Amino acid sequence: MIPKYQLLFGIILCLILAGEVASNIPESGKGLTGELDAARINGGQLMNESVPFQVSIQMLRRGRWRHFCSGSIVSEQHVLTAAHCVDKLQVGNLSVLGGTLNWQLDGRHRHRIVAKHVHPLYTMSPRIINDIALLRISPPFQLQLAEIAAVPLGGGARIGRQMPVRLTGWGSITPTSTGAQVPDRLQVLNYQTISNEECVQKGFRVTPNEICALSAPGQGACMGDSGGPLILTASGRPLQLVGIVSYGSATCAQGKPDVYTRVSSFLPYISKILSQDLAQATHKR
């Protein structure tokens, strides 16, 4: 049996390779079979609204930048993502691209990753826990621009079951890592959370520091969505980041839950890293 961490790292490399043929994938899904269109992994919808806090995390390969994970802007110098996205990688050939719905457009909002903070208790054995990391970037994000913004993190209150949430990402539109196809354009899926007890009943050994969401078969997170944002969209409540794409079933969108790192459980950790980096930057001046 392949250890989970090797499997996920292998999937990340598969996605980088998949990026080399991503330009051949039609943005709207035209040219694909009707069966595949109906089962687009991220719900079959293009995201046509700006998502100013979402970034594509990319690796330089053969002179081109390749998407492999997502992240969320949380300060002018930081991106929040999943630990498994960056734990085994050197930051020297990584960057983030913000302010775009199309990860292939090499616009002005590309930023180098200069440091990573992987949660000290992150592990993938015997199960995935504390799957969270912060990336420090340079130059800083221009938060005064309309297309760039930090995502609200909300408070420490835990959200429960049947809460409306939104997933956005550039994840594969095929259900397995073999032949993964990464869309150019950002995809969106609106669905609901389920309780941790329901998630356990469906086969996932989740902890209180995780949150699960479930949609119909054919819809859900997939390879390339890792690290991306799960946003609470409840009526009468402000949008806020509640989850980070962590893991799911080996074959995507098979009527199984998607598991997210529960952001509210890690607010003290996030605050500590942001303050720590700010203090270091101030000391260097």
Image: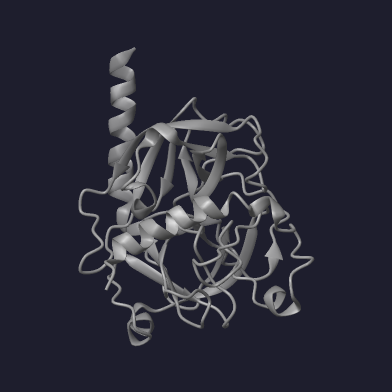
Describe the colour scheme in one phrase.
Answer: one colour
User: Residue shown at 33%/78% (left/top)?
Assistant: 204
Whether residue 25 is visible to the viewer of this picture, yes or no, is yes
Q: Tell me residue 194's x, y (percent).
A: 44, 78
User: Residue shown at 56%/67% (left/top)?
Assistant: 234
Q: Quadrant of residue 84?
A: bottom left
Q: Tell me residue 59's x, y (percent).
A: 48, 41
- Is the C terminus in the top left, top right, bottom left or bottom right quadrant? top left
Q: Tell me residue 195's x, y (percent).
A: 39, 79
159 to 62, vertically: above or below: below
Q: Residue furthest top?
A: 285
212 to 184, vertically: above or below: below
Lateral position of residue 258 relative to residue 48, left or right: left
Q: Residue furthest bottom?
A: 201
28 to 204, vertically: above or below: above
- Is the N terminus in the top left, top right, bottom left or bottom right quadrant? bottom left
Lateral position of residue 98 relative to residue 94, left or right: right
Q: Residue furthest front?
A: 62
Whether residue 227 is visible to the viewer of this picture, yes or no, is no
User: Residue shown at 64%/60% (left/top)?
Assistant: 187
Observer-nearest of 163 and 1: 1
